Amino acid sequence: MDRGGARTAQPRRDRDSGIASRSHHAGVDPCSEICLHPGVILITDERCTEYHSPGHPERPERIRGTLAKLRSLPGLKITWEKPVAVDPGVLLRAHTTQHLQRLGEAKSDFDGDTPAHPGIFDHAVRGVGGGLAALAAARRGEPNLSLLRPPGHHATPSRAMGFCYLGTIAITVLEALETGSKRVAVLDFDVHHGNGTEAILAGKKGAFFASIHQHPCYPGTGLADVADNCFNYPVPPEHPRLEYRKVIERALERLLAQKPDLLAVSAGFDAYARDPIAHETLETEDFHWLGERIRKTGLPVFNILEGGYSDDLPELVAAYLKGLTGR
Ligand SMILES: [Zn+2]
């Protein structure tokens, strides 16, 4: 969000089971000719860098810089994929017809943080297509990340807000539940409360949501649990990073207690100590820990980029992916 306020040689790897990703023990790399590390599926589309507003923190360089960093990263085997096509009915499970019409027209800004960029509907739909591609990768047992903009976790059923236009992760969770998953848990570690994901998933059978976020901070929600499936973990500003990790661990444990068969991750990197629009304390190694912790759940996982506005975003994403793939 939001300005202050307002894949290899694949030796020995069973591509269809993801066994390697769940049995590997870190610390014995280095990934050379005989490599037991899984690769990673990165879903992107460079058209997502084609829009911007001067001075806006949610800027094209977030993706350009991250793509450049990942392309140059030694040892990380990347398979690049494109977002898949999205059926309008998939969007309508989460959003009102009026909201989709307004997005399509994009005649006026949605709020001060959320401009009516030309073509923003198509950009946001490609974001959803990235989520769906990440879901497919998760079901193949392959580590993945959808690296697109705009982010999505603040978009409610009827409103674009906080740099977000469509509820990408919630839409993808509803599609997962419609296509065979029984219990899907969403871990949102973006520093801002995932109010949009919550608004879409509250009370939805089989969906569980946990958000760890700074409070007070935009959008000001997420102080208490909602319905019986949305769990909120507000954290004061400047919370010591090892304590912040403990809160994330508690949230994750609560999600795992719901016995999910699929884990969805709203991967936001703005709880970083030097993020310009929040005031938390995480360091690069904490995002590596997060990736590793999520890998160790042994669940199929799909990951969608949310926020993260510092110039160090590429390093943070790289650390997360290393954790996610056991490096
Ligand atoms: Zn955020």
Image: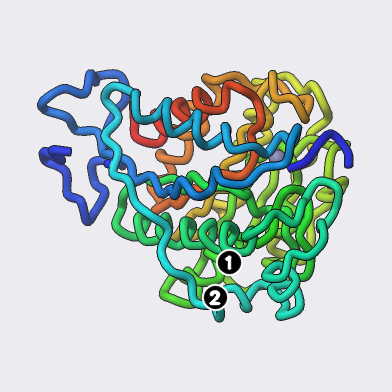
- Which label was assigned to residue 171? 1
Q: Is 235 on the left-hand or right-hand side of 133?
A: right
The spot of residue 280 in percent (x, y) is: 74, 25
Q: Which secondary structure lies at badge 2? A: helix
Above or below 161: residue 46: above
Split into 4 quadrants, where in the image is the C terminus? Answer: top left
In depth, the one of 127 and 13 nearer the eye is 127
- Quadrant in which residue 297 is drawn: top left
Residue pictured at 72% horizontal, 70% vertical: 105
Above or below 318: residue 51: below
The spot of residue 217 in percent (x, y) is: 85, 37
Q: Which secondary structure lies at badge 1? A: helix
Name the residue carrying label 2.
90
- Which label was assigned to residue 324? none
Please state which amino acid type lies under the numbered disc 2: Val
Q: Is 259 on the left-hand or right-hand side of 163?
A: left
Report crowding for label 1: few under 14, some 14 to 19, many 20 or more residues within 10 A (C-alpha).
many
The spot of residue 10 in percent (x, y) is: 15, 40
Please state which amino acid type lies under the numbered disc 1: Ile
First in residue order: circle 1 vs circle 2: 2
Quarter of the rendered image showing ligand 1:
top right
Q: Is 35 on the left-hand or right-hand side of 95?
A: left
In depth, the one of 297 and 64 nearer the eye is 64
3D distance between C-alphas at marks 1 and 2? 7 Å
Q: Are marks 1 and 2 in contact (CB under 8 Å)?
A: yes
